[in-house]
Image (cartoon, helix red, strand yellow):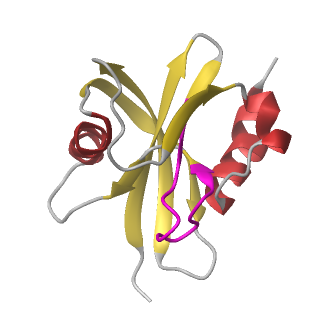
Amino acid sequence: MALIPVVAAIIRKEEKLLLGRRPHHKRHGGLWEFPGGKVDAHETEFEAVARELLEEFGVETTAVGSVVYECRDPDSPFLVRFLDARIRGKLEPTEHTEISWYEPESRRTVDLAPCDARFVAEYLLRKAP
């Protein structure tokens, strides 16, 4: 099975991270995730993050860092790659049923999609001071 690259944007506001709740009719519906989506053919990760954030929230992406963590989504061909991103503009969700800002430590009270949960536990919390 060929892997399909997916980008997940880590957007920070002070100590909190932006998460969106996936629509119920989609894979991992109802769970929270870092925003993003599939990388189109001939698209860089920066271009994919910028396109997805514009489509999903109507915001401009001003910077995208390198991949800090990646995870194979269980029972799928998706390889989710997490990258820091900075945005400009007012968040107006069109894809997620709701959005919120969370502290990484609140992961036990937030139902995260599988790769997002692993990213928080294995990368964010492990790196916390």
Query: Which quarter of the image is occupied by the C terminus?
Result: top right
> Please, what is the dominant secondary structure of the magenta stretch?
loop
Q: Name above or below for residue 80 compared with residue 52.
A: below
The one nearer the camera, 125 or 92, is 92
Above-or-below relation of 46 to 112: above
Give the residue drawn at x 59%, y 27%.
17
Location of residue 92 (image quadrant): top left
Point out the image quarter for the N terminus. Answer: bottom left
Residue at the left extreme? 42
Residue 118 covered by magenta stretch: no
Name which quarter of the figure residue 120 lies in: top right
Where residue 101 appears, as percent x and y from the top left, is 59, 26
Q: Can residue 126 be seen?
A: no
The answer to which quarter of the image holds residue 75 is bottom right
| 25 falls in the magenta region | yes
Depth check: 82 or 20 in front?
A: 20
Q: Residue furthest top?
A: 14
Q: Is residue 116 visible?
A: yes
The stretch of residues the image draws in magenta is: 18-32
